[in-house]
Image (cartoon, rainbow, N blue to C red):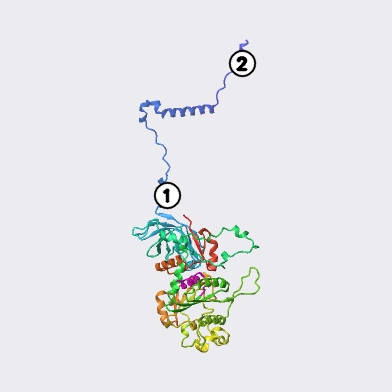
Amino acid sequence: MAESGSKHVGFAEPPKELEEHHDALRKKEEEKLEYNPFHKIPPELSYLHKKPAGPKPLPQEPVKPVRTQKSNEILGDLRMMAIKDISVQNKQTEVNFSYPEIDLKLVPSAILVNVKYSSLNGFDLSKVNTYAWNFSDTRVGLGYEYVGVVSRVGSSVQDFSPGDKVFGCTCPTARHGALSSSVILMPGRDIILPVDEELEQKLQTVDAELVLDLDPKFAVKDEEEDDSEENEESPQISNWPALSKLCAFPVQYCRSKQALQHLKPSTRSNILINGADTLLGVTLLQVLCSSLYSGDITVILVIRESSSQYMTELVNKLTKDPTKARRFYLIPFDMKNDDLVLAGEKTPINYKKPEFFATEVLNALFGSANANQITKANVNEYKLDLVVDIIGSKRFLQKQGIRYDRIQTLNIPFVSKLGEPLTDVLNAGTKEPFLVKIMKPKAHNSSFVSFCNYALDPPSYSIDKQLPGTQSSGLWSMKWSQSLANSLLSTFNYYEEHGLEVKRQWLEEGLQLMVDGEVKFRAEYMDWRQFRKHIASLRRDDGMFLFQVEDF
């Protein structure tokens, strides 16, 4: 039959591996159901079911607590204030701006002043030379003179209040300087003087700048000269602000008083200034011509030849008053060099021979005497009472072996004033430096005041050579031992005035002379941010700059 020949279609039996796989899946499902609390107990009692303990956690380091920033760390210490100053770490580092902090928690006697004007001159840089090494974190600040406004005062300060205008000098031996946006002053250490409205009004009309017709800064240029380079530079401010004038005189006037305090009062005085064409020398000349000094004064001005025209104009200006008996003699220590000098070469200095220099000095000392008047018995009346050495005297004044017999044979005006041979008048048989021959004996209170290294040779206008910071003259370098050394060792009184000494009386005196127009000063006024380009010139030569200090 047909049915017996038909084919049946069905599923093949699954392989054994597949059955084992399904068995494994069923076992897993049963294990899940076994540990499912909702499978055996009601949901309301599921919290009673005990689960098997899980794996132990891995060991972990204790978590450090997160440190939160305090408010004073975000805002900074409000007792400290950042300032901007011109300072240096030591002699080997560069003068530059720095940004230290000062503590606003003032000691009871302190005063915080916001500086508005200050100054910088060549002498100020000698302060850096005294710090060959500085292992302190405190930098050495520059500048001594300041004008500013009182910002805060200590609890015991009664003479000043916030808002008062003041001026003065910082302590010369302190590390801080006046060229700073703010400075902490101590009345017992620093000189602080008030500026009232009356003084400020007077300063508006005071002409404190010394300008002569031959001053190169105000010289008239030829029409053919090109002005393009000058126009590119920022113009110099020739009219000083009223308050800035108070920064022009303190240091120079105090230094001049350091020299003149050794001049004994007399009806007739003979003075020699070695380096009279420096800022200090020019100030000394004006002070000697002021109302502070009377009597007959003869001043020998030793200068460089290149300053002759300027100094001649200054002397003519100072001697216009016929009521003052003042005689000035200009003596250059060098002569104009006519040698051929190639472009870029440094012109060598043509120093005078010591005998020529000595002849000019003797002619200035004895030139005012009558004929045949000077003898060995009265020669001390014509000798020097005071010598002020600013640039170095070793090459000329300390020279020994001057041939006075040769000088006497020259046709020089002073030779006719001699009543005896020059060799007898000056006791030339005794070998002594020329300085000793022309100075009065110690019994006449003659004095030699040194503002530079006594052994400096040749004369120099560089502050680094005048006061390198390492010079010492033994007993004479210390104030307490100068009188002992002078009484035992020298033929004249010798005083070293290498450092700055400031006194309140001197500042008040100098201010009055400046207001009265008796003393003026050479300086340039500018913003203090331009100071860097003048540091090299101040080290090399004499000069002064008045700076406007920016608010910081």
Instruction: Give yes or no for residue 492 being in the magenta stretch.
Output: no
Query: Residue 464: image x %, image y %?
Result: 52, 70
**Residue type beneath disc 2:** Lys
> Of 491 and 17, which appears nearest the observer?
491
- Residue closest to the far top: 1
The residue under label 2 is 7
Instruction: Give yes or no for residue 289 being in the magenta stretch.
Output: yes
The residue under label 1 is 75
Q: In this view, does 304 lie to the left or right of 85?
A: right
**Residue type beneath disc 1:** Leu
Q: How would you rate the neighbour count of disc 2 (Cα within 10 Å): few for under 14, some for 14-19, many for 20 or more?
A: few
* Residue span colored magenta: 274-290
> Of 207 and 189, which appears nearest the observer?
207
Numbered label tally: 2
Q: Which residue is drawn at 57% across and 74% down?
A: 305
Is the C-beta separation of discs 1 and 2 under 8 Å?
no
Q: Is residue 86 above or below residue 349?
A: above
Query: Residue 318: image x %, image y %?
Result: 50, 72
Labelled disc at residue 245: none
Query: Residue 354: image x %, image y %?
Result: 56, 81
Q: Which of the two discs, 1 and 2, labels the residue nearer the N terminus?
A: 2
- Residue closest to the far front: 322
Q: Could you say which quadrant of the image residue 497 lies in?
A: bottom left
